[in-house]
Amino acid sequence: MADTPRLKHKYGTIDKDYGIFLATRPPAEDGPIYMVNLMKYHEVAQYTDDAGVDKPISGREADDRYNPSSILAKIGATIVFVGDVVSNRAGDEDWDRIAIVRYATRKSFIDMQSRRDFSDKHVHKAAGMQRTIIVCCRPENPALDNRGRPKTDDDRHVLMVVRRTSDRTSAFNEVPNAVNLAAEGTIIGDGRTWDTVQFVAAASPEDLSSLHAKVSQHIAGDAYVMAVRASMDSITQG
């Protein structure tokens, strides 16, 4: 349609083949999908001159303005995790924030991109985000699909591991007591396809730091190991 908005951004490369896969799932093959967002912000948001923003703001502030929670609710999607990265111990890039949205279907994620109300908000994400990776996952334990929106908790300590691997089973076994997500595809990023995402809750900042150091020592290859202070988390808590 001629009036369908076209989203513009410079924060990552779209995997068009995987996008077609998401958009064309027949109902019998579709279902919930978890979009795991790794986010790095511009120090100062990069708005265009016609964006109507009258003073410089940070990339994080621009992302806060983007906040699409009202639109997600309209399409039956649920924010299940939000956290600030407090340290990056492994990986060739650092990250600022993590967010995970569970969409009711793969197709609903694609359909959202053509909504006018989403496009209006997306200008803030495009201005604030320096780079993003979105890994699309299914949980090892399907019971995770039944967890609702988590309560706000500003002091939840979580270790997060994202990696590329040809052996998911071994990767899952290397991180005891983790909630494991198997990646189906990477819809946006730097051209690499990620395979596993794992989360482990820690009892305190000190325990998180210790766990962060221990896990980082034996993670080989392409991987990110991050300590995250979560404000919302229904991934590691029911």
Image: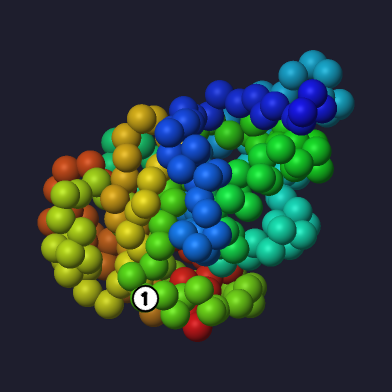
Residue that carries the numbered disc 1 in the rendered image: 141
At 53% across and 29% down in the image, what residue appears?
11
Report x, y in % for residue 159. Answer: 36, 64
Residue 157, by quadrant, is bottom left
Percent position (x, y) of residue 72? Answer: 70, 57
Which element type, helix, strand or loop, lies under badge 1?
A: loop
Q: Is residue 80 left or right of residue 209?
A: right
Q: Residue furthest bottom?
A: 238
Q: Residue at x 60, y 77 (%)?
A: 148
- Occupied quadrant, residue 211: bottom left
- Residue located at (30% from left, 55% from top): 196
Residue 199 can be seen, yes or no: no
Please give left or right for residue 183 compared with residue 97 in the image: left
Q: Residue at x 35, y 36 (%)?
A: 93
Relative to residue 36, is residue 151 depicted above or below? below
Disc 1 residue type (three-letter): Asn
Neighbours of disc 1 within 10 Å: few (<14), some (14-19), many (20+): few
Q: Find the residue positioned furthest to the top.
A: 49
Could one spot residue 197 in this view of the protein? yes
